[in-house]
Amino acid sequence: MKLELLEAIAQRFGQYEMIFSLRRIDDNLLRLTLDFDEFYLDMSKSKSSIFQTKERILGNPYHSPFDLALTRYCSRAKLMGCRVDGKNRILIVEFLHCAGYKQNPYALHFEFTGRHTNVILIDQNQRVLEALRHIGESKSSRVIKPNKPFSPLPQPIQDYPNHKPITNEELDLLLMEAYAERMQSRIAQKKQLLISQRKKKIDDLVLLIKQLPDPYDLQDQARTYALWGELIFSSPLPKHFSHSFVLQDYEHREIKIELPSRIKSFAQGGNFCFAQSKKLKQKLKNLSIQKEFLDSKIAFLKREIAYIQSIEQECDLQVFLQKKHRHREKDKKDYESFFIDGIKVSIGKNAKENQKLLEDAKANDLWLHIQNIPSSHMIIHCGKTYIREEILMQSAKILLGMNGILDKNISVDYTQRRFVKIIEGANVLYSKQKTLRF
C-alpha cells in the first residue's frame, strides 16, 4: 500500500467520532465500522489493502483471543484520532474504551509492512494486549506477544519524494478500485479451486456408476438360481448328495448345478438357490435406485459448477470454501450444509434429501423454496433468532444458483417450518409465506 494513500485514509478516518465495531470476517480480512460507514482491511502478507464496497461482505465469527479482544475493546469506542507513523506504512488508530465510569486509552496499529503485515492492539502502558500474528523471540528481535512491551518500528532511512495530496473524490474511487482488483483476482483463484474440486467429485461418481454390476448379468443370475431351485425340488436327484451334479430342465437339456461347500443336502441346496435368486432380484431393484441417486449427485454438482461460474461477488463464493471441522463431519447429515455469517443453512440435493431436511428442521426454522418450480428445499437453522435481510437474500440466491436458475424475474417463498405440511415424500403445502423477488 502506498504511503500517500494511507495518509489520505488516516485523514478520512480521523473525521469519525466512534469505532462502532471491528470484526474479523475472514482469516486476514477485518471489517471496521466507523460511525455508520464500513471499511475493509485486508491484512494478508504482501497483499494488504484497504477498500470499500457497496455490498456488505458477510463472514463467520472468529473466537480466538485476538478476536475476543477486538470485541471487548473496540466495540462502541470513542475515536480520538488517526495518523500514519511517520514514513512507515503503519496506520495508528487511537481510541477510548469505556469500562464503567473509566475511559482508558488504547491504540490499534495496522502495519501494512509486506511480509510482516500485522494488527496490534496496545494498551495505555505501551504493552501488547493482542495481535493478529504473534511473533516470538526465535523469529525476530521485535517480539509481538500479549503482555510484552510494544516496540515501534524505526523510521526508514530513505527519503520519500513529495506527492500531491489525494482528494476525497479520488480516495473514494481508489477504495472502490482496490476492492474491484482484489475481488477479480481472488474470485478467479477461488472459482478455479472450487470447480476443480467438483469436477474431481463428478469423475469419482462416474467411476462408481461404471463399477456398478451389469443389470442384465444380475437378471440372468437370478433366473439361473431360480431354475436350479425348481429343478432340485421337481427333478429326480442322484442317490448320493454332491455339490456338483447334472439335472435335466423342462426341455430335457442338461443343466450343471454347482452348490457351495457349506451346503449339506439337496433340500438345503434348493432353498439356497431360491434365496440367492431373491437376493439378486432385490439387488437389481436397488441398483436402479443407487444409479438414480448417483446421477442426482452428479446433476447437483454440475448445477453447482454453473452457479460458481456465474458468481461475481467473493462473499457468494465463501460458503463453498468453509473449513470442515471434525465434530461437524461426525454429525454429518444426509444433505448439504454451510454457514452464512455464522448461521447454518442446509439444502437438499434430491427428493430423498429434501424429505430428510424437512423432518430434521425445527418449527421456528425458516424454510425456503422457489415459487411454482419443483426444486430443492432449503432450511435456515435459526430457531427464534432474527435473520437479517441480507442473509435471507444470499440464501435465496444460493438456492436459485444450485438449482440451475440464474435468470431474473423469479421469486423465492419463505416461511417458518411450522407452516409447511408434508403431503407425500417431499411434496408440501405451505402458508403464511413471504416472497423474495429477483
Image (cartoon, rainbow, N blue to C red):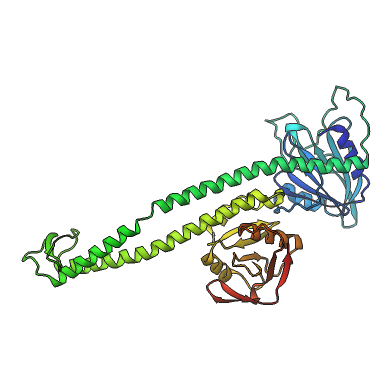
Q: Is residue 169 left or right of residue 66?
A: right
| Vertical arrangement, residue 148 with respect to residue 333, above or below | above
Residue drawn at x 90%, y 40% is: 170
In which quadrant of the rendered image does the N terminus lie?
Answer: top right
| Vertical arrangement, residue 370 with respect to residue 305, above or below | below
Q: Is residue 236 left or right of residue 282?
A: left
- Report the front residue among 166 and 126: 166
Residue 74 pos. (x, y %): 82, 50
Work out whether residue 82 can be spotted.
no
Which residue is at the far front?
A: 251
Residue 275 pos. (x, y %): 26, 68
Which residue is at the far left?
A: 239
Work out whether residue 428 can be spotted.
yes
Q: Is residue 418 left or right of residue 210?
A: right
In which quadrant of the rendered image does the C terminus lie?
Answer: bottom right
- Report the front residue among 110 and 188: 188
- Report the front residue among 37 and 69: 37
Residue drawn at x 94%, y 46% is: 15
Residue 174 pos. (x, y %): 85, 40
Residue 29 pos. (x, y %): 74, 45
Q: Is residue 65 left or right of residue 236?
A: right
Which residue is at the far top?
A: 158
Count of numbered circles on the image:
0
Residue drawn at x 51%, y 59% is: 296
| Vertical arrangement, residue 53 with respect to residue 393, above or below | above
- Report the front residue among 268 and 213: 213
